[in-house]
Amino acid sequence: MLDGVIRQALAHSPTLVAANATLAKAQEQVTVASGQLEPQIDFGASAGRQKPGAAFVGPLARHFPPFTAYSIGATAHYDLDLFGGTRRLIEQQTALASYQRFRLDAAYLSLTGSVVTESVQIAALRLRIAIVQSIIVDDQKNVDLVQAAYTVGAATVVDVSSVESQLANDQTLLPPLRQRLSESRDALAILAGATPGDWQAPSFDLDTITLPDAMPVVMPSELVHQRPDILAVEAQLHAASAAIGVATADMFPKIELSASGATEELTTGALFGPGSAAWSLISAISQPIFHGGELAAKRRAAVDDFHAALAEYEQTVLQSLGQVADSLHALAHDAEELAAQKRAVKAADLSLDLTRSAFQAGQVGAIDVLDAERRAQQARLGYARARAQQYDDATQLFLATGGGVVGGDWTQGHGGPSG
């Protein structure tokens, strides 16, 4: 059931659609930048009305009437990229595309993690509701027990009132739990890309959701490196480094070659006739001399951006290691708590049975029965919370390691779409 909901979410999530579109745009930017290393060839045609001035034909200018000139042909441009500015731009755009790809992986991981979290929450709430319902059944048994004792004079009106009050109080626990269950089901429907009214969440049960056979107590730090957020800031750092190269290249000369071939005539009919061909071959160099400090400032800004990206990378790595450590500690404590809660449930249930028998024998009062029932209630609800917490912490460990923990093998591997 869980796999089915995850597949539904991956197929219909607007978040993933947006992330995929952003990635596609970034990849097209790489193509745009790469095209600058190739010759640029354009085709053009022109028609214009002209009249030469005296500077070109001298005093005879008045004898040259206006005329129409036609031209059609191709022009080619090629930037030699001697100082690597275009190549560093391509490198920058490629790194930014990688950043968007890892953002997509992060969205994938976040979506699947949220689906699992909500599904576990549904299972946990259903278990708590079942426990409270069983508690209410026990409360009713206590009411019947005390009323029977009251009938034969073995209990007082206060005893009857106490057990009836306990029943009423425990009945108030159900509506909030059912409300939270409805909210979790609605949240899961939205994650699955559907409206709550059109899609019904499965009835998850903690007993049907399986954890790995052995949960780790330590983990190699290399496993954390596959996290999409770490890979994304690495890509940002790479892009910032390439941006320094682009800004540096802008401070050096640019050499461009251009060539054109066309036919030029005074009438359209003669455009492709003999003697109409014209061509040109031009090389141009430009060297920035004075830009008011703009180019140097851009390079300094690129260096500052790189330092900021480096600091963000280091902070992300530290936070990631901290999250993994927290998850490992939580799992260790979950195992201890779950074992303790099992013992508490067993002891509380035995105490409740013995106390009821003692009450029927007239050895204890109704208050003792209520106290024993309250301890049993707390133990059972505590056990349910401990189980749900263990599942939730296991999910958080999967997320903290970038989704790379598969089945029961805590090995490297990427759970995202591009891993």
Image (cartoon, rainbow, N blue to C red):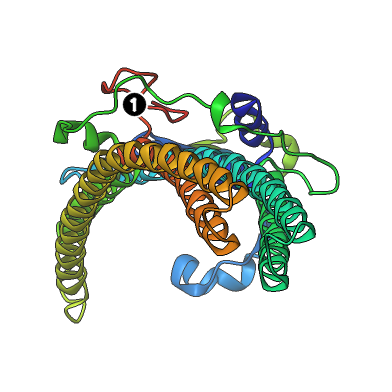
Residue nearer the viewer, 397 or 109: 397
Residue nearer the viewer, 276 or 224: 224
Residue 33 visible at all: no
Residue nearer the viewer, 325 or 345: 345
Residue 206 percent across, percent down from the top left: 55, 32
Question: Residue pushed farthest right?
Answer: 197
Residue 318 visible at all: yes
Count of labels shown? 1
Q: How many neighbours does mark 1 have within 10 angstroms: few (below 14), some (14-19), or many (20 or more)? A: many
Question: Residue pushed farthest front?
Answer: 153
Location of mark 1 (residue): 405
Residue 317 percent across, percent down from the top left: 19, 49
| Residue pictured at 16% horizontal, 67% vertical | 304
280 relative to 9 in the view: left or right? left
Query: In terms of secondary structure, where does tag 1 sit?
Result: loop
State the quadrant of the N terminus. top right
Quadrant in the picture for residue 235? top left
State the quadrant of the C terminus. top left
332 relative to 251 in the view: left or right? right
Identity of the amino acid at label 1? Val
| Residue pictured at 17% horizontal, 74% vertical | 297
Above/below status of 299 relative to 278: below
Quadrant in the picture for residue 308? bottom left
Residue nearer the viewer, 30 or 350: 350
171 relative to 303 in the view: left or right? right
Residue 416 percent across, percent down from the top left: 43, 30
Quadrant in the picture for residue 68? bottom right
| Residue pictured at 23% horizontal, 29% vertical | 216
Residue 369 percent across, percent down from the top left: 56, 55
